[in-house]
Image: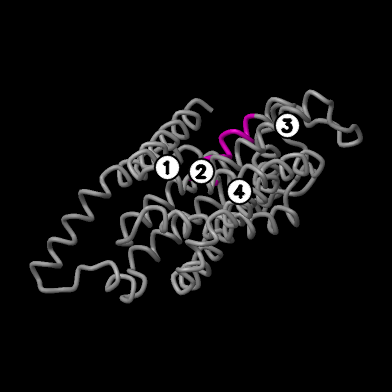
Amino acid sequence: MKDSTGLRFRHAPCHGRPHRSRDLAPLNGDALLLAAAGFGAGLVNGVAGGGTLLSFPALLAVGHTALVANVTSSVGIWTGYVGGVAGFRREVAAQRDRVRALAPVALGGGLTGAVLLLVTPADLFEDVAPVLVLLACALFAAQPVLAGRLRARRAEQGAPSSRSAARRAGIPLPALVGTFAASIYGGYFGPGLGVILLAVLGLALDDELVRVNGVRGVLSLAVSTVTVVVFAIGADVDWADAGVLAVTALVGGYSGARLSRRLPVPVLRAVVIVLGVVAAAKLWSG
């Protein structure tokens, strides 16, 4: 519900499916569904992102409106990102400078997107979200070819083309701009954030996919953290259901990160693209 300024208020009545009573504990069946969805969301986010596509429908299934499900999902699966970063701790520790440069950008973008969700209609961004996810999938699929052409061009120009030189060169501007744009999306409407971030970073950074995926995990955690703070202050979160999601998402996130390290690069790339296409299809289908 909005007043004349356009602001949504906590506990305001929502149109659509009625909100479940907060005075009743979740039914056993609901709790089991949310627990499974939390683990699955954490697992998928640990691998490559897209876990909200499991937690969001589960919250709709237990009786929440779309807006409440969106913010509760964002809060509940925050622990999954924590678990994912823990699983990627080796890759993250080797890229501290890169993380320090990109994390503030992700925080700024996430804050911008979360505030936009509270002050503007959600329909506009939801309409373009499937297009953004599919674009990210296309970029990610084309990343090996594009990166190869960029390396060949640098070699022709006599520029250093080794990965070690690329790592010393700092963060390219496309990585900064892409991270900020993707983080706005993640703060506003999260499904597919990991896929978009991984596509942007995979294209902009000349590095191994598993290392890029570690950075993606940290940036996803940064976006999730700022949205949790904003939604806790200004949105209608169902804390009981968010708590159920949080417990199992932590385990799933750590497991997913460990699994992604063991997957061959082509398999991981295929998994990311499939997750992105599924994300777009679910967003289009509502």
User: Mark number for residue 263?
Assistant: 1
Q: Is residue 51 magenta?
A: yes
Badge 4 vs badge 1, beta-carbon distance below 8 Å: no
Which of 13/111 is in front?
111
Which of 158/199 is in front?
158
Q: Which residue is mark 3?
A: 64
Give the amino acid at mark 1: Leu
Q: Earlier in the sequence, mark 2 or mark 3?
A: 3
Q: Earlier in the sequence, mark 3 or mark 4?
A: 3
Give the distance between the C-alpha atoms of the residues marked 4 and 2, in whole angstroms. Answer: 9 Å
Give the distance between the C-alpha atoms of the residues marked 3 and 4, in whole angstroms. Answer: 28 Å
Residue 224 on image: x %, y %: 61, 54
User: Which-is-in-front pick, marks 1 and 3?
Assistant: 1
User: Mark number for residue 259?
Assistant: 2
Q: Earlier in the sequence, mark 4 or mark 1?
A: 4
In the rendered structure, the answer to whether residue 276 lies left or right of residue 41 reads left
